[in-house]
Image (cartoon, rainbow, N blue to C red):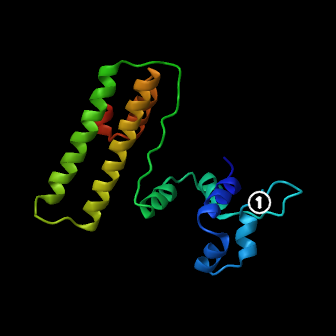
Amino acid sequence: MQSHELLREVFEKKSAKHVAADLGLSPSMIYKWAEPSDNAAGSGIGNPLDRIEALLKSTSDHRLVQWICQRANGFFILNPKNTPHPHQLIPATNQIVQEFADLLHVIATATANEKVSQAEAGEIRARWEELKTVTEGFVAGCEQGDFNPMRKHAIRHAPASHQARM
């Protein structure tokens, strides 16, 4: 689905005029967001969704998507890349257990003094995001019978002490 098509559907549930009032923009601008911007016949302009996509492509920084997902009370999990070489189930399972153990270690260390600092909370969040990503890779691997993408991701993101075990 194209961004302008999604916006058109969104504006069916909440009118473009209402959105314009909420955002302090003209209704005509909001209506233009729901038109194709790459079509010479269309008068659409680059909408916020296209701009976010362009920013993501420019930076390759998934924290942008994570931030948006957090604002929507959700979370972002990166899909694993598909590769044709299958891996065994046991190493893939072990990687999830290791990631969970790493998360528990970070939590235990952070809570040892009965409080959690902002830096510790950030480290807990980072390990949690990594666990979700590795687990998503495992689930996708189960569905496709291919665990190699998860293993490559784990090796790339693991601390040096863990890489020796992989």
Q: Residue 116: x percent and y percent?
A: 20, 64
Query: Residue type at mark 1?
Result: Glu
Return the residue found at the far left: 113
Estimate how packed mark 1 is, as few (under 14), some (14 to 19) or many (20 or more) residues with alpha carbons within 10 Å. Answer: many
Count of residue discs: 1
Vertical position of residue 34 compared to residue 62: above or below: below
Residue 122: quarter of image = bottom left
Q: Is 135 positioned to the left or the right of 106 in the image?
A: right
Q: Residue at x 53, y 20 (%)?
A: 84
Query: What residue did someone put label 1 on?
Result: 35
Vertical position of residue 46 compared to residue 90: above or below: below
Q: Is 40 positioned to the left or the right of 93 in the image?
A: right
Residue in the foreground of this view, choosing between 55 and 136: 136
Residue 151: quarter of image = top left
Q: Residue at x 62, y 80 (%)?
A: 21
Q: Residue at x 36, y 45 (%)?
A: 130
Q: Is 101 positioned to the left or the right of 143 in the image?
A: left
Residue 46: quarter of image = bottom right
Residue in the foreground of this view, choosing between 120 and 23: 23
Task: Give the secondary structure at mark 1.
Answer: loop
Q: Can residue 166 be seen at all in this image of the molecule?
A: no
Residue in the foreground of this view, choosing between 92 and 31: 31
